[in-house]
Structures are given as C-alpha cells and as structure tokens.
Image: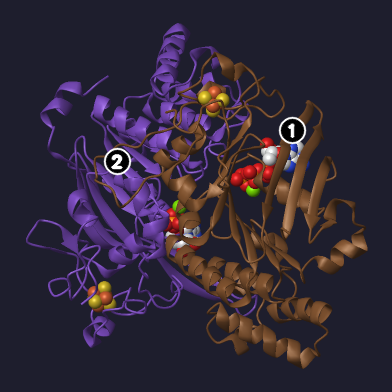
C-alpha cells in the first residue's frame, strides 16, 4: 500500500491534530406555526492531538456529542468552526477528490453491528466493498484472498465468506465491521461505541481483538464508549466529554487514580463494582440534578448545574481547557485546589 | 413458604424453521422481601421466563410448568384472577419504558389509573399519592411535571416514572427487566440507589433481570445465572461472586471490565458464541466454550447442591478448577 515508508518515519509523531472543532446543528422545536429555530451545539470547541500507534478513549453520556465528533474527525460532517489536520493537511480545505483519497487512511466502526451492515450483501461483498471503491480494477482472486485473510485476522471462519449478516451473532457482525474497516490498511480507525450493543463476555472479545490489531498494525485508534470501564483496558489517554466540550484529557494511568475534573470523578464513582462487599459501600456520585438540555446548556462552566464543587466564578466564566503540570489537560477553574483521588473522602 | 416458586418452567416459540427452546426446565424460588438477580447473556431466556409467569408470551409462544405465587399457580389462573394480582401484588417494569408508557396520556392519568384501580382511592387521593411517588423518585417539580406527556421526559426520567409506577401499590413482588441498561451510568447509579431505598421501605421482593454484574452486587441477595435457557448456577451474591462453581459464571465474572483493578490486568473473554436455540447440542450446553470440558460433558450434567443454598449444573465438583 502507498505511503508505507513515509508512515514509518512518522512513528511517535502527531498524525492527527483537532483544533477548536465545533459542529452546530439548526433544529426546530415546537409546532408547525409557532416553531422556533435553535442552534444545538453538539460539539463546541474540542481540541486534541493523536500520535501514530496511540489509542485515545472518548467517554461521555448519551447526547454529549461523541458520534458527531467522530464524524467530524473523519470529514463526514463539515465542522461549523475549527480544523482537523491529518498528517499536517487541513481536511476541510481539500476538494472532494483529494478528501476521497485520504479516506483510505481514515476508517470507522459503528455502534450497532447488525444495522451497520447491508443485509443483502454477503460477508465477502461487505468486506470487499472499500477495495472495489478504491481499486476498481483489482482482480477478483486478489479480493477473495484479501477478504479471507481479513476474516482470519478478526477471528471469523473464512469458509463463511458467502453468508449474510443475519446469520451471525452481534459479536460476529462487529468482527465483520472491523474487517471491513481494516481492509484498506488504514492508519486511523475511529470506533464509535463498538461494544455498547454486545454482552460482556463478547465485549471482552472485541476489546481484546481491537487491542491486538492496534498493536500489530500500529494503528492510531479513537475508541468511543459511554462508560469509563470499557475504555480503560484499551486507551493510552482518555478524553471526557460533557455537552459538546472536553472536560479532561488525561493519560490512563493518572485519570483512573486521580481525575482532574469533578465530572470525571463522578463518572468513575458511578460505575458499579462487581464485588458485593465493595458495592455495599459504593460512593455517591455527588452529582445534583439531571443532564441539562443541549439546546439550553448552562452558561459559564457547562457542568456547573451539577457540580458539587461549584463556586461563583463557574457560573460566569467558561473554563478553558488548559495544561496541568503533569502534561494532562483539564477545563475547570478549581483544578489546582481539588484533590479528587479515588478512594479518598472528599475534602 | 416462598413468595414465588417456579417449577420446571419450559418456554418454546414456534417459528417457520422449527421450535426455539427459549427456557428449559427452569426452577427457582424467591422469599418475601428478598432481591433475586437473574443474569445471563442476551437471548438466554431471562425476559421470556418472566413473560411466561405473567402470561404475556407472544402469540407463537407456549409454556409449561408451575409458577406458585403464595401457593397459587399463576400459570393455571384465568385472566381475571391474574389481572387482579398484576399491578397490586405483582408489578413489572419492562425492558423498554417507551413500550409500557402510553405516549398519548399524561403521566398523571397513567399513574392515577393504577392506584384507583387497585387501592380504591378517590381521584384526589390517588393524585396526591402519585405526586408523592414522583417526588420519591426525584422528579423535580412533580406537581407541574405530572401534567406532562412521556415524550417531555428524558430517558432517565421515564425510567424513574416506571420505577415509581412499579412501586406505587407497594406490591409484594416487583419484576424489573433491565431497568437501568439503556441509561447513562450516572442515571443508573441514581436508579439503583432508589430501588434499594424503596425496597427497604416497603419490603417489596425484587426479581432484577440484568446483564450488569455490578448492579447485582450492589442490589441483590441471591443470583440465578442462566445460559441458553437453563439455570446453570444459583446462590447468594457472596457464593456467586467469591466462590463461583460453574465455568460460565467464572468466565462471566472475569470478562467484566473493572475500574478497581490495575490498568494492565487484561480482560478475559469467553471464546465463541452461545448455541443456537433451534439446534441445542446434546449434553452440556456450555461445552463448546468451556475451558474445563471433558468427555463426561457429552451427557447432561446434574444440578449439584452444597447444602447451603448453592447449586450448579456441571460435572465438576465443588473444589475442581
Ligand atoms: N416471539 C418469539 N418468537 C421466536 N423466538 C423468540 C420470541 N421471543 C423470544 N424469542 C427467543 O427466545 C430466546 C430468549 O429470549 P429472551 O427475550 O428471554 O432473552 P433475554 O435473556 O431476555 O435477552 P436480553 O438480555 O437480550 O433481553 C431468544 O433466543 C429469543 O430470540
Ligand atoms: N443531524 C442532527 N441534527 C440535529 N441535532 C443533531 C444531529 N445529530 C446529532 N444531533 C444532536 O447533537 C447532540 C450530540 O449527538 P451525538 O453526537 O449523536 O451524541 P452521542 O454520540 O454522544 O450520543 C445530541 O443532542 C443530538 O440530538
Ligand atoms: S469550573 Fe466550577 S463548576 Fe466547572 S467543574 Fe470546575 S468547579 Fe465545577
Ligand atoms: S459440564 Fe463440562 S462442559 Fe459443562 S460447564 Fe461443566 S465442565 Fe464445562
Ligand atoms: Mg453516539
Ligand atoms: Mg430481555
């Protein structure tokens, strides 16, 4: 595949830079004649960088903008503001044809494994489709060989190549989705909640598979989930999103021990521990109230309506995402004063 | 006497390709005030077990066996007698709250009907009671909110309304089918806490159907593990979490990603997939995925009992690995 040498030189380099990315939607609320148009800021100023061979976990509750961010990163939605730089090139400035070429490097795996696959296509055609799209002249035998190889790689039996998606379980459909995403040898794969629809025993299979493939192929991976336990085993760094904004971006080793943001700490406490003795003394999340409507997010810090540590300043001033001494990032006015070490009583 | 005792429940569905054996010879019981979890992967028969008990199976489904509620067999009961018990003595929260709330009726109407029907209160009394329940499940501003329609509530609020409705008549038994699965973790935590509080107050017995072993550990006294339509292990939460005997239960516990363990401890998956319920294998149904499978497992494994309420369906003895 083209670009392999160049790629080797880029190891340990930033391959993806996302700068102040925003995606706003116009939505109408209300009945036909007195409807109003609102702006829904699904993603509102997100910045981060990703290295070759690195895995970034993105976590947040439903509606916080995860899928929208995923699409914007891959150039599948036009951002309202901000830039996505892939290998130094601004994807927003490329024309259709150039963007199409870059897509070979950038792939996605979707949440609902069965719904994401065309029910009328065989596994062969589903996995081969990107090959046909990018290499229309490729020989049929070559395609078959590649598809069988991919099936083996993701743990499917190559002799099932002529079967249809409904003949497979959820976990197997997700393997098909992964094989399809990897068939072009991409450099970046964005997985949008790839295991949320799967049972725990199967979830673990898919997480382990992605982790192995990531190492083997030196992929850059963005792994989206709605809960922190799922991304823990696969991420080098984790970003926590809330109402379209990044609250924290920290290395895995720091985040689960001593989160910097009160929302991260609440998300950690909310995950139930599968141990009866520990579960009985499970900590309260400390959160007040419900998630605000994304149509009418709080002013100042978007988290202030639920934050147990809120002070006056939080209602007035939006906290910038800033770098702490240890190199991790947080958007909270009080980050220096708070010690959110897990297992420690709040001060 | 147990509050509810199931004996040899079978559930099957007729489909063009043959017969789906959704539940096979399932027996268990729950005492008054207890909390029992039913866990198992998707399709293992959890929901259909309770649907059969409540006589709510789909047209193509059929069930046999006994379901003794306070000594009376629900499966033999006529619709009128069963209806009298539903809501008042037994309440059920379904997997998807939108299917059980009527989208065209205000929350008020839906809640008041339940109370008036079962408790013979006046409309005004029933309304006051409903508002009190909404407040108990922490719906903000319940006097105003009770006049809204389900679509005006967030997913988490709808689920809390379902919990409120389930507990409205202080039933003896609440069957909750995945009450938190579709919800965000922070909302899940709220609902779990709520169910614990309400249970303590009203002494309601709960059957909690769930995938989430974390929720089980925090909420339940006993656990029934199902696999491919069968009970494979049953015991107290301590027995199941600290001394699991069945290889499937062991595998399930190891595959849960945990926040309270070191970062690099890998996840152990159970290989393979559950069997097709149309073509169930002979012998142990877990055999193809079981790391301890041996020749004997081609026969049907017995249910073993340790005399302390712990039971498991496997050829392995209590100390075998
Ligand atoms: N009407 C039906 N016709 C045919 N098969 C059915 C029907 N209803 C359920 N089944 C099958 O019965 C089996 C058990 O289903 P059940 O709904 O009890 O699973 P479950 O354990 O509740 O799973 P989940 O965790 O996904 O809710 C499944 O294989 C399902 O496909
Ligand atoms: N095409 C669209 N038009 C209007 N609103 C949208 C559209 N797509 C997403 N949204 C809204 O944007 C917000 C973020 O959505 P999404 O990125 O799908 O969240 P997540 O993946 O985190 O659950 C939600 O409030 C959602 O309803
Ligand atoms: S800025 Fe204020 S409201 Fe926001 S997270 Fe920090 S302390 Fe809480
Ligand atoms: S009976 Fe055999 S195959 Fe089945 S769970 Fe026990 S050891 Fe495994
Ligand atoms: Mg999404
Ligand atoms: Mg179910």
Q: Label for residue B21?
A: 1
Q: Residue furthest top?
A: A141
Q: Residue A340: horizontal and vertical position, in percent?
A: 21, 67
Q: Residues within 10 Å of mark 2 (few under 14, many from 20)?
A: many
Position of residue B255 in the picture relative to residue B88 (left or right): left
Position of residue B270 in the picture relative to residue B198 (left or right): left
| Residue at 60%, 74% in the rendered image | B152
Q: Residue furthest front?
A: B307
Position of residue A208 in the picture relative to residue B159 (left or right): left
Q: Chain of mark 1?
A: B
Viewer-nearest residue: B275 or A337 = B275
Colour of the chain lettered A: purple
Q: CA distance from mark 2 to mark 1?
A: 37 Å
On the question of residue A162 being in view, the answer is no
Q: In the figure, A244 relative to B127: above or below?
A: above
Q: Chain of mark 2?
A: A
Q: Residues within 10 Å of mark 1 (few under 14, many from 20)?
A: many
Q: In the figure, A48 relative to A166: above or below?
A: below
Q: Label for residue A234?
A: 2
């Amino acid at each position: 595949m083209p670009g392999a040498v160049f790629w080797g030189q880029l190891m340990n380099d930033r391959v993806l830079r996302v700068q102040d990315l925003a995606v706003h939607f116009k939505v109408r609320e209300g009945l036909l004649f007195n409807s109003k148009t609102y702006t829904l800021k699904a993603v509102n100023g997100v910045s981060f960088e990703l290295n070759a061979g690195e895995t970034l976990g993105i976590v947040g509750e439903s509606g916080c903008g995860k899928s929208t961010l995923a699409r914007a990163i891959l150039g599948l939605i036009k951002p309202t503001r901000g830039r996505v730089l892939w290998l130094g090139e601004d994807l927003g400035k490329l024309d259709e044809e150039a963007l199409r070429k870059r897509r070979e490097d950038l792939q996605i795996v979707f949440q609902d494994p069965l719904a994401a696959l065309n029910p009328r296509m065989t596994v062969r055609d589903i996995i081969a489709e990107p090959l046909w799209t990018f290499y229309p002249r490729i020989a049929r035998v070559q395609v078959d060989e590649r598809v069988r190889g991919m099936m083996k790689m993701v743990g499917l039996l190559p002799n099932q190549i002529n079967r249809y998606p409904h003949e497979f379980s959820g976990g197997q459909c997700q393997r098909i989705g992964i094989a399809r995403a990897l068939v072009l040898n991409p450099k970046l794969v964005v997985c949008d909640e790839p295991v949320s629809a799967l049972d725990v025993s199967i979830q673990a299979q898919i997480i382990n598979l992605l982790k192995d493939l990531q190492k083997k192929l030196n992929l850059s991976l963005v792994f989206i989930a709605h809960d922190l336990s799922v991304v823990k085993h696969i991420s080098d760094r984790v970003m926590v999103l809330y109402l379209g904004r990044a609250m924290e971006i920290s290395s895995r080793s720091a985040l689960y021990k001593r989160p910097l943001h009160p929302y991260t700490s609440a998300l950690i406490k909310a995950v139930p521990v599968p141990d009866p003795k520990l579960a009985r003394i499970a900590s309260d999340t400390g959160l007040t109230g419900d998630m605000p409507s994304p149509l009418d997010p709080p002013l100042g810090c978007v988290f202030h309506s639920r934050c147990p540590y809120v002070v006056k300043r939080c209602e007035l001033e939006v906290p910038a995402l800033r770098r702490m001494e240890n190199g991790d990032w947080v958007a909270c006015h009080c980050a220096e004063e708070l010690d959110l070490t897990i297992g420690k009583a709040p001060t | 006497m147990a509050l509810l005792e199931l004996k040899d429940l079978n559930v099957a569905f007729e489909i063009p390709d043959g017969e789906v054996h959704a539940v096979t010879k399932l027996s268990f019981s729950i005492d008054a005030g207890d909390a029992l979890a039913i866990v198992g992967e998707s399709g293992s028969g959890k929901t259909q077990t309770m649907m059969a008990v409540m006589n709510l199976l789909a047209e193509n489904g059929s069930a046999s066996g006994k379901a003794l509620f306070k000594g009376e067999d629900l499966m033999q009961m006529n619709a009128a007698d069963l209806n009298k018990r539903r809501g008042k003595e037994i309440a059920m929260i379904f997997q998807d709250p939108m299917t059980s709330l009527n989208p065209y009726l205000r929350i008020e109407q839906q809640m008041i009907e339940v109370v008036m029907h079962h408790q013979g209160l006046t409309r005004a009394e029933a309304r006051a009671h409903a508002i009190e329940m909404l407040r108990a499940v922490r719906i903000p501003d319940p006097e105003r909110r009770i006049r809204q329609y389900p679509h005006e509530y967030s997913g988490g609020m709808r689920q809390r309304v379902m919990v409120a409705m389930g507990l409205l008549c202080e039933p003896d038994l609440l069957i909750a089918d995945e009450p938190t699965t579709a919800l965000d973790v922070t909302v899940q935590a709220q609902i779990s806490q709520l169910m614990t509080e309400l249970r303590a107050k009203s002494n309601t017995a709960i059957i909690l159907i769930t995938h989430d072993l974390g929720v089980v550990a925090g909420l339940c006294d006993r656990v029934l593990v199902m696999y491919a339509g069968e009970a494979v292990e049953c015991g107290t939460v301590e027995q199941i979490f600290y001394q699991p005997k069945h290889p499937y239960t062991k595998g399930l516990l190891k595959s849960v990603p945990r926040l309270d363990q070191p970062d690099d401890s890998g996840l152990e998956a159970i290989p393979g997939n559950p069997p097709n319920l149309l073509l169930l294998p002979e012998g142990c149904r877990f055999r193809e995925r079981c790391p301890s499978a041996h020749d004997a497992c081609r026969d049907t494994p017995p249910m073993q009992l340790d005399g302390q309420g712990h039971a498991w369906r496997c050829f392995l003895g209590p100390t075998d690995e």
